[in-house]
Amino acid sequence: MSRGDDFHTAGAGLAWSALERPGALDRAATLDFDLVIIGGGITGAGIAREAALRGITFLLVDKEDFAFGTSSRSSKLVHGGMRYLAQKEWKLVREATTERNWLLAALPNLVRPLGFHYCAYLGSKDSPGRVKAALRLYDLLSNAFSRYRIRPHRILTPAQLKEREPGVRSEGMVLAGLYYDANVDDARLVVEILKEARDFSGGRSVALNYAEAAGILVEDGRVRGVEIRDRLSDRAFTVKANCVVNATGVWTGELAGPEIRPTKGVHLAIPNARLGNREAFILRSLDDGRNFFVLRRGDISLIGTTDTDYQGPLDSPFCTKEDADYLLRTVNIRFPGADITYDDILSTYAGIRPLVKDGGATASAVSRRHVIRDPGTGLVAIAGGKLTTFRVMGWDVLSHCSRQGYLRPLKGREKGRNFSRRPLKAGVTWEAFGRVLAGLGLEDLLPEATLRHLHQQYGHGAVAILAEVKADPPSGLPLLEGHPFCEAELRHILAFENAPTLMDLMLRRTEMQLTVSHRLQEALASRVAAVAGSFYGWDEPRIQREIASYLDYIRKTIFFQQAAHG
């Protein structure tokens, strides 16, 4: 199959292929929009969804791919922020746990409960009293007077924890608390929110990646439009708008937003078999006392994050030897039998947090609250915030713009803060998904591990992928032995998720870069590029350029490992 012909559309939503980009650019250049959103991360996507649910049309643009920045390089958690309790951020934790609980119900395939162990050791800052008090408060803020709730915490003895988690160090441990947050694929969450916003708009709104806001048009002190430049075709045009939102994350300060304090967070992925954690841990660094996580994500363990001030290029942060050493020192002491080395690292990634500058606070102490800045011109900026609270951030921006007269007044139920707290279109439980497949005769097409992967990542959209496999059985075969990715999945992404480049496919539409060893990336990239090349009609030089660009990125993520081996 080539160039997207005849792709099955059951359960997939509106088609959204890079092949249709010229038409999308035409619509962007000619339609009138109520709102222009600059930034295609989780904040911009959340604003777009809030607008679409209220019939407000939008043009969303990002100079890179959707979720290019922090929104694809987080700890991949939907969480309330246990460590923010120490900073007395009660309101933030309440807000985040409430949103977490809703997302667990609204998108159960992608947002999955994950148990966290919070251990009290002799001589540690985390005393038994501190751990117990934190867990009680976390439960209270999460579940009190809440429509959606999560399982309450438990207190475990060292022996009980050792039975659950044999690899963890029990020497000096007094007790452990078990509480719950949730795993998520952060970039996929962004894409699903954008797809839903487009579907609700029925084609009256447009979202463009690789389209730069090259300038803001201002007349008589008010915003009147935005100059757009398409970076893939170099086409330029002007969009009229009385309301423009700067939701560019770490780049906010470049477009008349609040000053940002960028801090870098690094994560390491290793085979779970090497560390052996069955659930997650919140650890306190033995170097500087900061908290970081050891997470369970299927067959990998994800270790991170660091939190250091960052002065480098915002587009290209990478893990350094110092970052890796910082994380591994504590992990190897708390999991004494693991002896994790550089050779165990499958992949790394680094992201920049868009924290609003806050005086002389340490990087870890800077508040994660979001702020809205509005000089009264119609150019509104939002900065800070958390992946988990995207819906609240979107609502706050939209309601602010309406109150200021930049958008029409909100009416009736749409004025409510919880108007958008409804199930997400992709969301489906495993049990309900199984019933759908049985009804369509699709339940036995692929191994259960592959079915679970497709259900987790695409929810209802996986039905379209399985329909493709039924029509073309070889498209369901694994692209790489031991991994669930298949050609039908890639075709679905290419047809419905606007991924113009190989980097988009492997870094942000799938977790190929995260979960597949860097040693196997060249073979995998060649296979993925062949599928994309067939779909898009790329010639061989274009395919090779795409592969080379991706492999150059991979080398930069693990250069410290190569240096260690000379």
Image (cartoon, helix red, strand yellow):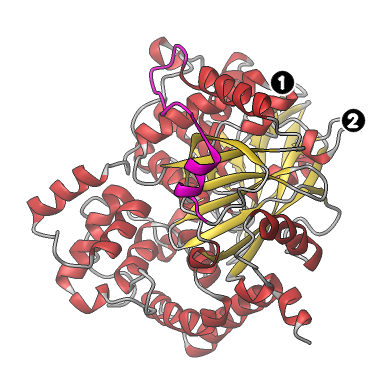
Instruction: Note whether 118 is above or below 563 in the view shown.
Output: above
Asked whether 442 falls inside the magenta stretch, the response is: no
The amino acid on which the numbered mark 2 sits, given as a three-letter code, is Gly
**Depth check: 508 or 273 in front?**
273
Please tell me which residue is depicted at 78% across the width and 26% down the height of the picture.
Answer: 221
The residue that mark 2 highlights is 359
Residue at 26% in and 60% down: 451
Say if residue 533 shows up in the picture. yes
Label 2: element kind: loop
Could one spot residue 207 in this view of the protein? no
Label 2 crowd (10 A; few <14 / some 14-19 / many >=20): few
Q: Is residue 365 above or below residue 458?
A: above
The stretch in magenta equals 144-166
**Residue 365, position as x, y percentages in the image:** 79, 33
User: Which x, y percent locates residue 270?
Assistant: 57, 66
What distance separates the C-alpha of mark 1 from that of mark 2?
Answer: 18 Å
Identify the residue under disc 1.
88
Mark 1 and mark 2 residues within 8 Å of each other at the beta carbon: no
- Choose top left, top right, bottom left or bottom right for residue 559: bottom right
For the residue pair 274 and 542, the one nearer the viewer reads as 274
The residue furthest right is 360
User: Which one is earlier in the sequence, the residue at label 1 or at label 2?
Assistant: 1
Query: Quick one: SS at disc 1?
Result: loop
Inspect the image, locate mark 1, and give the three-letter code of the amino acid beneath it.
Lys
Q: In the image, is 542 to the left or to the right of 310? A: left
The residue at the point 60 percent across, 68 percent down is 347
Characterize the local packing of mark 1: few (<14), some (14-19) or many (20 or more) Cα atoms within 10 angstroms: few
Quadrant (top left/top right/bottom left/bottom right) for the C terminus: bottom right
Count of labels shown? 2
